[in-house]
Image: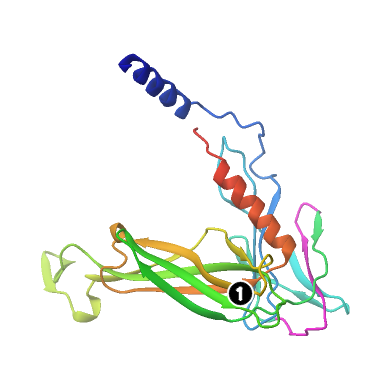
């Protein structure tokens, strides 16, 4: 029996360290274009990020500069986005017209052009509550929402965490050169710090199969005690977006594929 156990452990260990040979080798500068963002016809800016897919044997973040991006309205109006650098493009505000349709157009320096389909604005209902529950490992955070008009059905969320932390020991003095050490002024104390994190997970939910358009306590994130985020002060800002069924289906496909893929390089 012991010999069988050792044999199973050996097989598992070998399988976990097997190298994955990617079938695709993409030139670093010529990979497919990746577009991140959406047209925001509500209060606030529209932000679009452009980058390029790279090969697994030479991973890198390649942002796309020099592109021309605009939001087009079906009435012929064109609203250009400004290039901010690092592959980011933005426009501060788009005129809100519920009866209008909008689409995104992109022209890259290599002469290629891309455009989305025209779409009508989608009004996102407000968040009802952001709640939390204590667990032995930490805190689970949830979001609840509903749409009385039953026009939504598909949701996406993002969040930003901010927490306070301190260094292991206070630094009451500083070296200013020439062998001089002075007491650190209160305005320059570095014992207390703040850090932030913006979510990168695909957080989507749907009420399409329910009798009413309601999402109750959708799990947003878990904050573990081991991360030290909850020691002093912690806050989370949750943003909610109503999305189309096509967008939801795409995100769901990407999420499932990400969960099923494991690489050992």
Answer with left or right where residue 90 lies relative to residue 136.
right
Image vertical order of residue 64 relative to residue 82, above or below: above
Within 10 Å of the Cα at label 1, are there few (<14), some (14-19), or many (20+) other Cα atoms?
Answer: some
Q: Is residue 64 visible?
A: no
Residue 90 falls in image quadrant? bottom right
Q: Position of residue 133 (x, y in %)?
A: 38, 69
Q: The residue tagged with tag 1: helix, strand or loop?
A: strand
Residue 9 falls in image quadrant? top left
Q: Magenta segment range?
A: 94-111
Q: Position of residue 51 (x, y in %)?
A: 64, 54
Closer to the camera, 177 or 99?
Answer: 99
Q: Position of residue 95 (x, y in %)?
A: 74, 84
Q: Quadrant of the N terminus?
A: top left
Image vertical order of residue 216 relative to residue 44, above or below: above
Q: Position of residue 128 (x, y in %)?
A: 53, 81
Image vertical order of residue 261 relative to residue 20, above or below: below
Residue displayed at 46% across by 76% down: 130
Answer with left or right where residue 221 lies relative to residue 258.
left
Q: Mostly what secondary structure, the magenta segment? A: loop
Q: Which residue is mark 1?
A: 214
In the displayed orientation, state which residue is furthest to the right: 75
């Amino acid at each position: 029996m012991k010999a069988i156990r050792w044999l199973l452990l050996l097989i598992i260990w070998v399988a976990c360290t097997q190298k994955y040979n990617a079938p695709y080798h993409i030139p670093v500068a010529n990979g497919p274009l990746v577009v991140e963002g959406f047209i925001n016809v509500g209060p606030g800016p529209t932000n679009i990020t452009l980058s390029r897919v790279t090969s697994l044997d030479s991973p890198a973040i390649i942002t796309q500069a020099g592109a021309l991006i605009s939001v087009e309205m079906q009435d012929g109006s064109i609203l250009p986005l400004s290039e901010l650098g690092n592959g980011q493009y933005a426009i501060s505000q788009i005129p809100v017209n519920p009866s209008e349709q909008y689409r995104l157009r992109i022209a890259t320096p290599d002469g290629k052009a891309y455009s989305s389909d025209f779409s009508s604005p989608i009004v996102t209902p407000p968040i009802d509550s952001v709640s939390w529950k204590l667990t032995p490992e930490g805190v689970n955070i949830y979001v609840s929402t509903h749409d009385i008009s039953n026009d939504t059905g598909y949701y996406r969320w993002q969040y930003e965490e901010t927490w306070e932390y301190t260094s292991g020991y206070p630094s009451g003095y500083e070296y200013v050169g020439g062998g001089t050490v002075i007491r650190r002024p209160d305005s320059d104390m570095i014992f207390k710090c703040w850090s932030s994190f913006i979510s990168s997970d695909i957080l989507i939910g749907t009420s399409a199969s329910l009798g009413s358009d309601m999402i109750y306590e959708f799990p947003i994130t878990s904050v573990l005690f081991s991360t030290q985020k909850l020691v002093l002060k912690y806050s989370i800002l949750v943003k909610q977006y109503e999305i189309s069924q096509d967008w939801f289906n795409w995100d769901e496909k990407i999420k499932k594929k990400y969960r099923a893929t494991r690489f050992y390089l």
